[in-house]
Image (cartoon, helix red, strand yellow):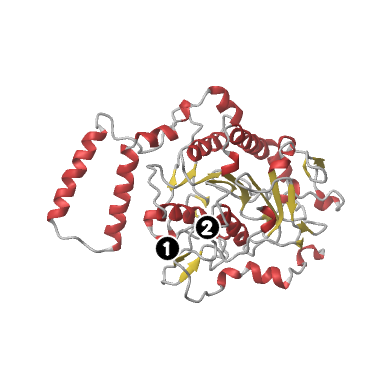
Amino acid sequence: MTDLFNHPISRRAAIRSVAGTSLFAGGWLNSAKPAAANSQPRAKSVILIFNCGAPSHLDLWDMKPNASSEVRGEWSPIDTVVPGIQISEKLPRLARHADKLAIVRTLHHQHSSHNSGMYWSIVGRPYHINSTLINPSRTDYPSFGTLTGWLAQKNGYTNPLPPYVITPAPHCDSKVYLTPGQFGACLGSKYDPFVLDSDPNAKDFRVPNLAPPEGFSAERLIQRQSLLGEFDNRGHPIAAPLVEELETNRRKAISLITSNDVGTAFDLSQEPDDVRERYGRHTWGQSHLLARRLVEAGVPFVTTVNGQSIVWDTHKDNFGRLKNSLIPPMETAYATLLEDLEERGLLDSTLVVWMGDFGRTPLINKEAGRDHWPQCYSMVLAGGGIRGGQVVGESDKTGAVPLLRPVTPADIHATIFTALGYDPHGITYHTADGRPTPLSEGDVVTELL
């Protein structure tokens, strides 16, 4: 067995990647004000494109053409519009957009199981165990999407649309095991995202439970709520967490059902056919189009989960699956989203983030697949004040570990919060046990901004 999987990570990288275990002393300012007068927001919204199951960095963004055949795989790198930057030959359309892209090639953490890996990626902290067989709870740390929604509401967000939307389905290993952190977590149900849980590419697509039952008008619903309120005022209030959550969810549901703006934003039938075709008539394409409609309507954070469950988990036939079913819809949807945002004047204010749970092993296994590899992988950012046309970090000759400029998910989160105008260290929230905790314990990747 080669020592390919035994490269040491630097002491600094190890410390940074477990920063989530640090305890912070008191004295943090618990507010949601923008960071500082000289840190003006670069972005207004974030679209997170998340590839559940973990795409192969070695076959997309960080190819190793000079490595042995057991590492480099079947494809070759191609030049992009930015001299010196190469990506996979399977991404020719994105090669033409490389001037917009910032490719980070040294992202890393320490959890190799899907749900805990997704948790570390979207929360920026390690889950307490490395496992796929886990589910959300109210003791979780919140994801950066949840926190962005929380910050928006703290700042007086009044849009009837939810401040955080996930389409088409939640992060998960399967519908039995949902990724912790993506809901309200320790912040409470008030900050749960709106999960579409429906296929926007379906012919009869409609957001579930977004309209009153047939023959039951919104006005009649409001009258019934008024009547219910009179009964509530005459009774004795019950101070219990479950009752408070029930009331919170009831108010959110009524707001969604009675708002015309909400229905309009989710109505893809209002898009011209040629626009829908550009994105691709598949779930990923229409989810990306929906994300554009939502940020256009003022939603601060939208996640598109590329794949029901962990479809990017290519333990077998890595190259066949990437070539035939995974890369084509992803590239089409992603490239079109960038083009559409730019054409509408929205790219400068919309930060588009592409990432997954972790990467894939440098060594190709006996079933022509690659296995889980959190020690080093790639992600891509564009728009929202991000400096495109660059690569941040360098992995070693096999893509196994960071060689230069290691970056953690927490660093990415700190950068995103900064781009949104929030101080990632000076703004805090309280964990389930009452401890003040900063938005992110990572360092801003200054090269990106």
Image x and y of residue 322, in percent:
69, 41
Q: Residue at x 68, y 70 (%)?
A: 14
Residue 334 vs residue 152: left or right? right
Q: Which mark is residue 270?
A: none
Q: CA distance from mark 2 to mark 1?
A: 20 Å
Residue 6 vs residue 237: left or right? right
The residue at the far front in this view is: 37
Image x and y of residue 244, in percent:
29, 58
Image x and y of residue 12, in percent:
70, 71
Q: Residue at x 52, y 46 (%)?
A: 44
How many numbered circles are shown? 2
Position above or below: 376 against 275: below
State which tag comes first along the sequence, 2 or 1: 1
Is the C-beta separation of discs 2 and 1 under 8 Å? no
The residue at the far left in this view is: 234
Q: Residue at x 58, y 65 (%)?
A: 130
Image x and y of residue 336, in percent:
62, 33
Tell me the residue that label 2 is attached to.
422
- Callout 1 secondary element: helix
Q: Residue at x 57, y 68 (%)?
A: 20
Mark 1: few/some/many CA within 10 Å (<14, 14-19, 20+): many
- Callout 2 secondary element: loop
Tell me the residue that label 1 is attached to.
186
